[in-house]
Image (tube, helix red, strand yellow):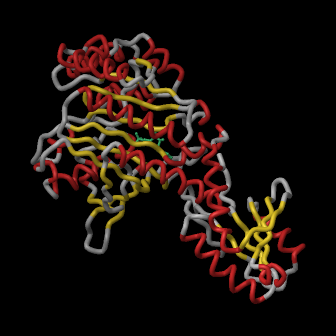
C-alpha cells in the first residue's frame, strides 16, 4: 500500500520551507516591534470552545470542523481558527484581569475540512493578532496598520484593504430585520444556502459568490447606512486614524466577515495575485465575544492572515524573500591539512552569521570543487591547498565575475563579512 499525506495537508521542506522561515522571521519581528507577545494554544480544544462561541451559523462550525471523540468520550476539535482558542486561554488564565490593553500574536496551523484548491487547504497556517481590553477606534486602525506593515515588510505590494462597520447590539438587530425583509422579497432568486442563511445569519448572504445572490445583495439595504450614532462615530474615527497613519484603504459596505462575534470594524485584505481565493487576511472588532464564554466582558480587535496565501502572492510578485538561500562561501580544501583548517573556519564563519558551505570530500581536485561551488550557487569559493598553506594565504574566487585574488588566511572571515554586508 502506498501511503500518502491527507488530502489538503502539505509537507513542507527544502527551499520552500526556507522561504517560509524567512517570511516567518520578518512577521515575528514586526509583531515584536508593534509590542505583540506570542501565545500558543493547543491544537485540540473542547468542541464547545467553537460551537458555543464562533457561532452555529458559520461554515466553520457547521461543516468544516475536524471533530473527534477521544477514549474518555470527550468531544474534541482540531482548532479551525485562532480567536476562540485565544479567548478561552485569556479567560482560563484570567489574563483580562491584568492591566490592559494587552497585545498578543499567534502563528499556528489551523484545520478546516474544506474542498482543497489553490490557496485553500485543510491544514493551513495563520498568523494573527489580538488586542484586548481597549474599545477605541485607534486600536482598530492600529490593527489594520499592523497588517499593512506586515504585508509590506514581507515584500507584498499589490494588495487592497477593504473596511466596513457591522454595527453593534444597538443598531444591528434593526438592520438585520430590514435586511431579512428585503431578502424575503427576493427569496426565489437566492441560492439554497442563502435561503438557510436568511434566518440564521442574514448578513452572510453578502459573502455568497453566486451571481443571482450577488445581484440581490447589490441593491440590498446596507449596514453602513443604518449605524447608530456611536457606531458611525467610531467608524469615522477609525478612518481618520488610517488617514493619519497613511494606510490606504477603501470603504466596502459588503464586508461582513463570516463570523458572528464581530462588532463595528470589519476589514479584509485581498490580493489579485491569488485568483478565486483572494483573501490574504481579515479581521475586526469582537466586543461581543468574551461574554459568550460566560464570565468576562471585555472588548477586543484582531486579525488573521493565511501564510500559504501570503507565500503564493509573494511568489507571484517575484519578491526578494523568495530567492533561494545559497551559501555565501564555498570552502574548497585540497588535501587533509587544508581540510582541517577550513573545517574549523567554516564553523567560525557560521557562528559569525556567514552561510559557509564546506566540502567534506578532501580528494575532489580543484576543478570539481569549483564545479560544486557553482552548483551550490555560492557567491565566493575559498580554495586552500598545500601551496596556499605554505604561504599562509587562500585563493578567493568571486563566482559571478570569475575574478580571484590571494589573501591571508587569517583575513578570510573579515573579507567575506564585509562583502556580504555590502550585498543588496
Ligand atoms: P478566516 O479565519 O476565515 O477569516 O481566514 C483568515 C485568513 O486565513 C484568510 O483570509 C485566508 O488567507 C486564510 N485561510 C482561511 N481558510 C483557509 C484555508 N482553508 N486554506 C488556506 N488559507 C486559509
Q: Eyeballing the image, is 170 above or below 419? A: above
Measuring 75% from the left and 83% from the top, which residue is drawn there? 338
Displayed quadrant of residue 15: bottom right
When the figure is inspected, residue 134 is found, relative to residue 363, above or below; the finding is above
Residue 373 occupies quadrant: bottom right
In the image, farthest residue toward the bottom: 336
Depth check: 385 or 156 in front?
A: 385
Relative image position of residue 309 (x, y in whole percent): 54, 43
List x then y, in percent, for residue 407.
Answer: 75, 68
95 to the left or right of 407? left
The answer to whether residue 374 is visible is no
Residue 148, horizontal then vertical, whole percent: 44, 33
Q: Is residue 383 visible?
A: yes
Q: Residue at x 26, y 66 (%)?
A: 74
Above or below 205: residue 33: below
Q: Is residue 116 left or right of residue 84?
A: right
**Rendered residue at 32%/59% (across/down):** 40
Quadrant containing the N terminus is bottom right
Give me the residue at 64% from left, 50% from top: 422
Query: Split into 4 quadrants, where in the image is the C terminus?
Result: top right
Q: Could you say where residue 349 lies in the image, as x and y percent from the top left?
A: 60, 70
Amino acid at each position: 500500500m502506498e501511503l500518502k499525506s491527507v488530502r489538503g495537508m502539505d509537507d513542507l521542506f527544502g527551499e520552500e520551507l526556507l522561504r517560509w522561515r524567512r517570511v516567518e522571521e520578518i512577521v515575528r519581528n514586526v509583531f515584536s516591534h508593534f509590542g505583540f507577545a506570542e501565545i500558543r494554544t493547543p491544537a485540540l480544544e473542547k468542541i464547545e470552545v467553537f460551537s458555543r462561541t464562533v457561532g452555529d451559523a458559520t461554515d466553520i462550525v457547521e461543516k468544516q470542523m475536524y471533530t473527534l471523540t477521544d477514549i474518555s468520550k470527550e468531544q474534541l476539535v482540531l482548532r479551525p481558527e485562532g480567536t476562540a482558542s485565544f479567548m478561552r486561554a485569556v479567560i482560563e488564565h484570567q489574563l483580562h484581569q491584568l492591566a490592559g490593553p494587552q497585545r498578543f500574536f499567534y502563528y499556528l496551523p489551523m484545520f478546516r475540512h474544506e474542498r482543497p484548491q489553490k490557496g485553500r487547504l485543510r491544514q493551513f497556517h495563520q498568523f494573527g493578532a489580538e488586542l484586548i481590553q481597549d474599545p477605541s477606534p485607534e486600536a482598530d486602525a492600529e490593527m489594520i496598520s499592523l497588517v499593512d506593515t506586515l504585508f509590506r515588510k514581507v515584500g507584498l505590494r499589490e494588495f487592497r484593504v477593504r473596511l466596513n462597520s457591522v454595527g453593534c447590539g444597538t443598531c444591528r438587530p434593526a438592520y438585520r430585520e430590514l435586511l431579512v425583509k428585503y431578502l424575503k422579497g427576493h427569496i426565489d432568486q437566492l441560492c439554497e444556502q442563502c435561503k438557510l442563511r436568511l434566518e440564521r445569519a442574514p448578513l452572510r448572504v453578502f459573502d455568497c459568490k453566486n451571481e443571482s445572490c450577488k445581484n440581490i445583495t447589490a441593491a440590498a439595504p446596507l449596514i453602513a447606512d443604518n449605524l447608530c450614532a456611536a457606531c458611525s462615530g467610531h467608524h469615522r474615527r477609525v478612518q481618520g486614524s488610517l488617514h493619519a497613519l497613511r494606510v490606504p484603504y477603501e470603504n466596502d459596505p459588503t464586508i461582513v466577515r463570516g463570523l458572528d462575534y464581530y462588532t463595528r470594524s470589519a476589514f479584509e485584505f485581498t490580493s489579485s495575485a491569488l485568483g478565486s481565493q483572494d483573501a490574504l487576511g481579515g479581521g475586526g472588532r469582537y466586543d461581543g465575544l468574551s461574554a459568550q464564554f460566560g464570565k468576562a466582558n471585555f472588548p477586543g480587535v484582531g486579525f488573521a492572515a493565511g501564510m500559504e496565501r501570503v507565500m503564493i502572492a509573494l511568489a507571484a510578485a517575484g519578491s526578494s524573500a523568495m530567492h533561494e538561500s545559497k551559501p555565501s562561501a564555498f570552502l574548497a580544501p585540497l588535501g587533509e591539512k587544508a581540510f582541517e583548517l577550513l573545517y574549523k573556519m567554516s564553523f567560525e564563519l557560521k557562528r559569525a552569521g556567514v552561510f559557509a558551505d564546506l566540502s567534506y570530500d578532501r580528494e575532489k581536485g580543484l576543478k570539481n570543487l569549483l564545479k560544486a561551488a557553482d552548483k551550490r550557487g555560492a557567491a565566493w569559493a575559498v580554495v586552500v591547498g598545500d601551496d596556499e598553506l605554505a604561504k599562509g594565504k587562500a585563493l578567493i574566487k568571486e563566482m559571478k565575475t570569475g575574478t580571484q585574488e590571494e589573501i591571508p588566511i587569517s583575513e578570510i572571515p573579515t573579507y567575506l563579512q564585509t562583502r556580504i554586508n555590502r550585498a543588496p
